[in-house]
Amino acid sequence: MPKGFTLTELLLVISIIALVSSVGGGIYVGTYKRLLVEKTARQFLQMASYARIMAIERQRPYELQLDAGGKGFGLTTTRVNTETGQNEKIIVKDLYCRPVEFEGDVKLEDIRIAIQPAEQTDEGDQSQRILFLPNGAAESAIVQIGDGKSHYTVAVVAATGKARMYEGTADNVRMASVDLDVQ
């Protein structure tokens, strides 16, 4: 008596494997996209923390620049040009900080920045940057990063310049303000 599998049994096993693979692939793609959003939000959080530290350490303002198209961000500061004696804006690129360009469908979905009138500079569009000052303070900001399905929000507290990351939309995060005169 010959032993083996019939064509029907082989086709049934192949169709089951194909079905399980397609379900697993869909789950993998969704997880990968969510992880891209989380990775980008963590990069934003780290750059905001780095901006605060460098502003305090170097005793000059640092700006977290947000791409107007919502596809990236980077850190800038000013320094004195030794030849001309003029201040010039430079993009920070070092071992710990590089401009970030988003991958996939990730983008800046919501940006809310409370700009302090006394701290505005005369350069460009002020709504697309978060200013970190040498005294450790910053502009209060809430930035939502997402891909339409997954969302992470980073909030910067004005009084301390510290940033925190939250899972979810910016609507679930309050813009914190601290009144230092209240006793």
Image: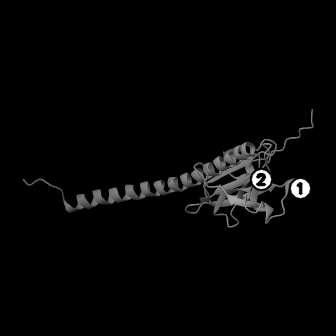
Question: N-terminal of the two: label 1 or label 2?
Answer: 1
Q: Position of residue 135 (x, y in %)?
A: 80, 43
Q: Is residue 108 above or below residue 57?
A: below
- Which residue is depicted at the point 67% across and 63% down? 70
Residue 131, numbered circle = 2
Please indicate whether residue 120 sits to the left or right of residue 57 in the image. Answer: right
In space, the residues marked 1 and 2 are separated at their CA atoms by 12 Å
Quick one: label 2, few (<14), some, or many (20+) residues within 10 Å? many
- The image quadrant where one finds the C terminus is top right
Q: What SS does tag 1 mark? A: helix
- Residue 105, position as x, y percentages in the image: 58, 63
Q: Quadrant of residue 5?
A: bottom left
Camera-side residue: 47 or 20? Answer: 47
| Residue indicated by mark 1 | 117
Is residue 62 in view from this perspective?
yes
Q: Whole-percent x and y of residue 30?
A: 51, 56
Q: How is the image coloured?
A: one colour
> 30 or 110, which is in the foreground?
110
Give the x, y percent position of residue 134: 78, 45
Amino acid type of the residue tagged 1 in the rendering: Pro
Q: Secondary structure at mark 2?
A: strand
Residue 167 seen in this snapshot: no
For the point 38% across and 56% down, the residue is 21
Looking at the rendered structure, the kind of residue marked 2 is Leu
Outermost residue on the top side: it is 183
